[in-house]
Structure formats: C-alpha cells, structure tokens
Amino acid sequence: MSDTAKLVFGAVLGVLYLVIGLLQMVGAVVGPLPGLDALSLTGNLFGGFVLLVVGAVFIAGVRKLAAGSGEGAIFVSVGFLLSVAFGLVELLALCALGLDAYLVGEWAEWSVADAVNPLLYLAVLGAVGFLAWGRTFLRGLTAA
Amino acid sequence: MKREIRIALTGNPNVGKTTLFNALTGSRQHVGNWPGVTVEKKTGKASRNGCEFEVVDLPGTYSLTAYSADEVVARDFILDEKPDVVVQVVDATNLERNLYLTTQLAELRTPIVVALNMADMAEAQGDPIDYRRLSAFLEIPVVRTVGTRGEGLQDLLDAAIREAETSPHHEHTIGYGNEVETLIATLVDALRTDADLSGRYPLRWLAVKLLEGDENVLAMVRGGAAFPRVEGVLSSIDADEYEAAMADKRYEAISAVLPQVRKASFREMSPSDMVDRVVTDRYLGIPIFLALMWGAFELTFTVATPFMTAIDTVVAWLAEFVAGSIEPAWLASLLGDGIIGGVGSVLIFLPNIFILFLILAILEDSGYLARAAFIMDRPLYALGLPGKSFVPMLVGFGCNVPAIMATRSIEGEKDRLLTILVNPFMSCSARLPVYILFAGVFFPEQAGSVVFFLYVLGIAVAIASAKLFRSTILPGEASPFVMEMPPYRIPTAKTALLHMWSRGSMYIRKAGTIILAGVLVVWVLASFPFGVEYGGAESFAGMIGHVLEPLVAPLGFDWKVAVALIFGFIAKEIVVGSLGTLYGTGEETLPTALLADPGLSAATALALMVFVLLYTPCVAALGVIRKETGSWKWTGFSVAYGLVVAWILAFVVGHGAGLFMGGM
C-alpha cells in the first residue's frame, strides 16, 4: 500500500487514540461521562495517558508523511507496533481476569464486555496496520 | 597430569563476553543486552583436550586506559595477574571500534586470541568477516564464534591451548610516526632504569601509556628511579594532543585492514535504527518509556491474579487445617498465625514477582532498556545526574544490591556517590508485595496504575534528590554520557525464562530463610509474655508498636504497621509477612483482615505504600552501600535521608489523598 493509505489510516487511528485517551483521562478525574458507554471507558488516568502516547506517535508520523518526510512512515509503523503491544497487554489481562473469575466461582457473573477497554479494541485496527506495514520491523532482527 | 590454562575474557562492553563465558563454563551468570552488566570479574571452569581452563570474565572496557572502577578491574587483571591467554571478544558487527582495544592488547606482549563473536549477525546484515585474513593481518588467532548458540567454542579453546604453548610472544606494534616514536624511545630508555617496572611490564607499552597521559601508569612510575627523566619528557608535551594523535594512528591501522577482511553492504537504515528514531525521539521518548512501564505493571498485577488466587486458596486451606487439627494451641498458633500467616502472605505474591522479572528480562534482552537510559540522559544531565546513572537505577527495579554495585561503571567519585545515594528510591521487587497487597485491597479497579504511580514516584524522588545533593553536599558537574546502543534483538523464551528464574528464585529462597526467621520473631513478640492475647497491646510486639506509634500516627498508621515497618528494615517483604502474622489471619485472608480494619483506609494505604517505597533500604542494601562508599557516614546519611523523605511524602500523599477520598 502507498504512503497515502498509510497517512490516512494513521491519521484515523491517531485521532481515535487521542480523542478516546482524552475522554478516558477526563472520565478519570470527573467521573463516568454520560452517553459514552459504547466506548467502554474505564476511567483509568494512566490508561488514558497510554492512549494519548500512542495517538501522539501516529500523529507525529502523519505530520511527517504529510510534509513529505520518509521518517513519517517509520513513526506510523512504530505506532502500529505500540498499538498491538498494548492490545496484547489488555488481552492477557482480560484472559487472566476471566480465569480468576472462574477460579473464585464468579464465572457466571463475569462478562467479556465488562473487561473490554479502548486499548483492546483499538488494537484490532492497529493489528490491521501492523499486518499491512509493520512486520518489516521484525525482519532482520536476530534472537537475543 | 592435566595442563591448567587461565583465560581472561576481555572486550568492549556488550559484545557477549558473559554469554561466551556461560557457554564455555556452563555457568548462568546474568547476561544483558546493554553495556555494564559485568562490574566485577567472575570465574568458571572448562576443559578440552586434556587441559583444564580457568575462565575469568572481566568487565567490559573500551581501552587499556582505565577511567571507571570496573575498567580498572579489567586492566589490572590482565596486567598484574598475567593470565596465560587473553581472549578478546569482538563484536563482528562493530569491528572498527572493537579492534581499537585489540591494538592496545597487542602491545602488551600477552598471548591473545580474538573471538569474533556475533558473527551470525554480521553475516545476516550482509557484512561477513573473512576471519582467516583478519588473523593473518593481525598475526593473532581469530576464531568465529556465536556465543548464544555455542558455536566456535571448541575452536576457541584449541586456539587458546596453542597460544598458551607458544613462546615467546612478540609484541605487535603500531607505528606512531617519527616524533612520537622518538619520545617512546626516550621514555623506554628512561624506564629501563626502573628494575621493578621493567621486570613486570613491557616498557614500550608503559611509554605509550605515559604519552597518552594515563594517570594509573604515571602513579606506578612516580617515586621510581625513572621518574625524573620521565617527568622531564612529559612536562614538555601536551598529553591530550599526543593521545589524540596516537588514537588516530591506531584507527589508521585498523582502517587499512578492514576493507581487506569485510565485504560491507551498507543499507540505508536497519530495523533497529528505524525503531530508535521513534523510541528515542526527543519529545516522544520519555512518554513511550512511561507508557511501556505502565503496561509492565498492568501485566504484573492482572496476569498474576488467578495464580495469586490459587496460592491464596492453598494457604487459606492450610491455615484452616492447622487451626482445626493441631494441638497444643501454641503450636497451632505458631504454624497457623506465624509461619502460614506470615510466609504464606508473602508467597502469594510470587506470581507478581516472576511476571515482573519476565517483563524486565524481555525489555532488557530486546535492547529497549539501553534506550531508556539514553532517553533519560537529557533530563538527568540537566538535573546534575550523569545519564550513566540510569542503568544502575533501572537495575534497581529488580534489586538495589546489584544496582548499587553496578555504579562501579560510573566515572567520577561524586557522580558515583550521588547515584548510590539515590538508588534506594528505585522500587525493588521486594517492595512489590506491599504495593500489590494494599493496591489490590484498597484500589481494586486501578491497582496496576497505583503500582505504576509508585514506581514513577520513586524515579521522581531519586532525580529530585540528586538535584538537591548536587546543589548542596556534592557540588560539581555531571560527566557526559557516552553509551553505545546495542542492536534490538528478539528475546528468546529460554533466556527470558532463565533470567526470570534466576532473579525470581531468590524470592523463594528469601521466603524460606530471612522472611521465615523474621515472621517467627514477630510471632514470638506477638505471643509473649505468657498468657497475653496474641498480638494484643500487652504482648512484646504491642509494647514495641505502642512506643513507636506516636512517630507514625500522623501518617495514619497504627502500632501493627509500626512493628511491620521496623521488621521491613531486614527485608521489605517482611512488612507483608509481619502484617500477616500480627493480624493472625488464621482462616481469613490478610486482604480481608486489612479491609475489615477500621484504622485503615485507601488514603492510609497510599501513605503506607509511599512510606515503604522511600524509607530505608533493607539490611543487604545498606551493607553494599557501606562497602561501595567505604563510609559509615554516607551509609547513615542514606538511612536518615530515606526516613525523613519517606515520612514527609507519606504525610503529604496520605493527607492529600484523604482530602479526596476521606479516611485520614
């Protein structure tokens, strides 16, 4: 795919991460925001900070791409990498919480929907970008 | 009889010396993908073809002009201990800089073998080295090795045997040009009059080092018969100028060899460089670092939860079994309240410790932690702390003891002392159980973020303290930081798990030794004098706690917490163990008991976590502070300063949180 596709996709992801990150941080300070249940905001201040950081990486890349700098593509690709990494963190957390609910006998009350958060569902989009552009990073790296 | 050969492994930092050492000797010394992991020499054994090898792993050094404590260890060993063979481990992907040390070693007239390590990486990058030609040019055996896969080890030992049996060895000299060579000849002539020195060191090497302004070599010459003439020569030259000129000549020689032994195919940018553009970005580098740290603590808390539940269930069952089936009552109390309540409440956090160490191992092996040190250099330097300090500070996330020892890589006594004094504020793994316990009980929805906040607070206090010390008791400018970025590597499951186990198993050992002893003492104090209520105000523990209570009452802590904090001096995990014993939880778990205590609130819990983060490090850390500073005065200062900072910040955080959450 071309740099234009990367620019558009990166811009969309960047804006989503920034907006949802901001809402998450605001929600952490003032309490649950009405009408935003669909976003699964957790009211976690630091979780919101992480969303902002990933968004900032995407936007930095998009700005560089728009200015014609080849470095922009690198920033967007690392953004995909971070998006997937934090998505994996949340996926592992979700699995662990589910397992814990099972162990303590609260499996019936536990719901995946309650454990979903923005870092998890935004990572699905990040994974799409990573599969399209990001995998080249892993090539050429050797085992430690 | 078997021939014994002593091999010294030397080389630049982070070229794989310890990996090779482990592969040769079967040891499991810690290996890290960043410079400065080895700060003191380590010894192991190997055998091959009827020879017994004593292999000594030396700290990394860029040259034989030693500046930092760990470089002095490496150089002194080669010069004074005179190993049979010096094996220089060379990073094949960075040949030019590595061969600079080779040119210096070659002047020592010591048998040398070059281990061309990470040869696979050089080949993967399209830059294979013709090691046979390199060997012919250097007139030194060169062996291709891949330490991580154990390739070339037998060839390396065979080459070492051949070199050890070859005698005599001639020195390999670099021609430094007429002017320098004339001065070298004059100095050699002068040094010959010093019988002691001329019998121990190659005179040309001594002369070269003197011209380079090497303070250690000058100290050796000072007071000897040759000193007046040497001083006469040195006073007539500018040592900095000569050092630069001689370094140029060495690089000229290297540059002449390199094109004939390598087929470099330069790419525009490697994947490592690409990732570095972003993660070391001036504006995004630190936020990315903080975000990754948050991810690490989120995982540490959440992924461990089901494992904690499983251990907790077993501990609770055991406590119930003991309470219901063992006689006499004092024995049931010893086993149930003391050992199971105390040690069990510490063991519950084993999964968290292992997961944190696994994540740190992955970050370290990938090469990211070296970048973290790099990106922290700018703010640290601005605050008067050398950027190199951040490597020991990061090591402090695991344990402050090796972290304080790692300060040996820092040049400059004041910089080193500064780093030692602030290192205890880096939150070691022993404090993690306290955070997990209280964050899990009082902040169940945000426990990972609370733990993350504490780690960041520790870094902030360390940096602020460094700034304070720099402008008061340790004035001066921080040394500039030069750090080589290791390439990113994909961590292997085996190495990451080995790192996790080697660090995490220490926690298990501590649980069975020092923590067990600590909780037994607490149990005795809580049970005696005879006839008192267990853990009551009339028990010894109650008496001690009530004496101390006024000191901690402004922080919202009661006498039980005071006793636990006192025992935390021995090891921080004992804070949890002591609480487990003092609460005499029996059939109920410690979290339940804490939640039911009306004296404890979310704000008090936050204050307690801040206090545990910042107050005096454990006895082992104090011991190593005493050893590394050589001063009881600085050790005492570290204790007092930590206590004062902990008290003030716990008060501020506790009462600040109390305003929002109530309960203080």
Image (spheres, grey):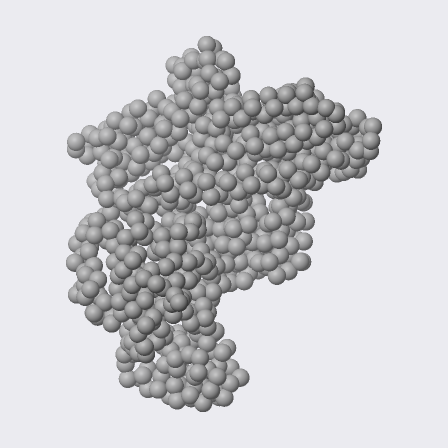
B97 versus B451 height, above or below: below
- Residue drawn at 74 percent across, 25 percent down: B328
Residue furthest top as drawn? A108
Q: Position of residue A108 (x, y in %)?
A: 46, 10
Q: Is residue B245 in sight in this rendering?
A: no
The mark tally for this picture is: 0
Quarter where residue B205 is shown: bottom left
Q: Quadrant of the C terminus of chain B?
A: top right
Q: Nearer the viewer, residue B71 or B245?
A: B71
Q: Is residue A34 above or below residue B308?
A: above
Q: Residue at the location (72% across, 33% down)?
A: B523
The x and y percentages for residue A50 are 41, 31
Q: Position of residue B26 (x, y in %)?
A: 39, 51
Left or right of B415 in this view: A143: left
Query: Which residue ends up furthest to the front in the rendered image?
Result: B1
Residue for point 66% across, 49% down: B639
Residue at 30% in and 61% down: B156
Q: Nearer the viewer, residue B365 or B310?
A: B310
Res A2 quadrant in image: top left
Residue A56 in sight in this render: yes
Does B15 sit left or right of B290 as displayed? left
**Position of residue B597 measured from the top left corner of the image (x, y, whole percent):** 69, 22
- Which of these two is toward me, B579 or B423? B579
User: In the rendered view of the protein, which quadrant contains the N terminus of chain B?
Assistant: bottom left
On the picture, is A72 further left or further right than B422? left
